[in-house]
Amino acid sequence: MRRTLSYLLSALMMTSVATGCATKIETTTTAPALGSDAKIVAKKGKTGNYEISISITNLAPAPRLEEGMTAFVVWVLQKDQPAVRAGALDYDEKDRAGELQVTSPDPSFTILITLEETVQPSSPGGKKILEQAVAVR
């Protein structure tokens, strides 16, 4: 019985330490995507880069938000650097949700999500639906 309790306590402590290392931000999107909920989780990975998980729920399809738009493109902004396209949200129209996993070499950055006509624009040009500063602790 004591051994089982010891294992359970050890597992609980490991779980709390592992989840305590991540920076978690919950926020909302801006017009024209009002009413959507965003979650950003960032942590230092094994390679030394920072792993970033972005998920948005209650997100209307891009064409419904603005005519001619087809994608939600994620950009990583770092101090004094041009925006870097990280990719497009993997959007599920049925669930009205999108997600993307990206990495950054810097612990401090800003996540920008824009509505775009294509999934591979060269720079942010569409309407901004989210801009969130992140600093991994």
Image: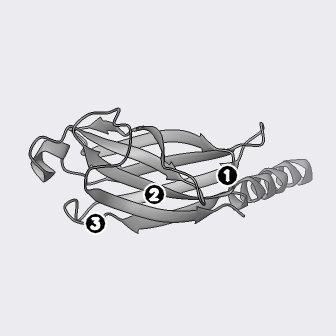
What mark, if any, has residue 30 been given in the picture? 3
Residue density around tag 3, few if under 14, some if 14–19, many if 20 or more, within 10 Å: some
Q: Is residue 71 left or right of residue 63?
A: right
Q: What amino acid is labelled 2 in the image?
A: Lys
Q: Residue furthest right?
A: 3
Residue density around tag 1, few if under 14, some if 14–19, many if 20 or more, within 10 Å: many
- According to the picture, the residue beneath numbered tag 1 turns out to be 43
Q: What amino acid is labelled 3 in the image?
A: Thr
Residue 75 position within the rendered picture, expressed as x and y whole percent measured from the top left: 45, 47
Q: Which label sits in the foreground, 2 or 3? A: 3
Position above or below: 105 against 79: above
- According to the picture, the residue beneath numbered tag 2 turns out to be 39
Residue 108 position within the rendered picture, expressed as x and y whole percent measured from the top left: 64, 60
CB within 8 Å, label 2 to label 1: no
Residue at (11% x, 40% y) in the render: 68
Q: Secondary structure at mark 2?
A: strand
Q: Secondary structure at mark 1?
A: strand
Q: Nearer the viewer, residue 16 or 119?
A: 119
Q: Is residue 44 left or right of residue 122?
A: right
Residue density around tag 2, few if under 14, some if 14–19, many if 20 or more, within 10 Å: some
Q: Which label sits in the foreground, 3 or 1? A: 3
Position above or below: 87 against 22: above
In three-dimensional space, the C-alpha distance between marks 2 and 3, rounded to whole angstroms, equals 14 Å
Q: Is residue 7 left or right of residue 129?
A: right
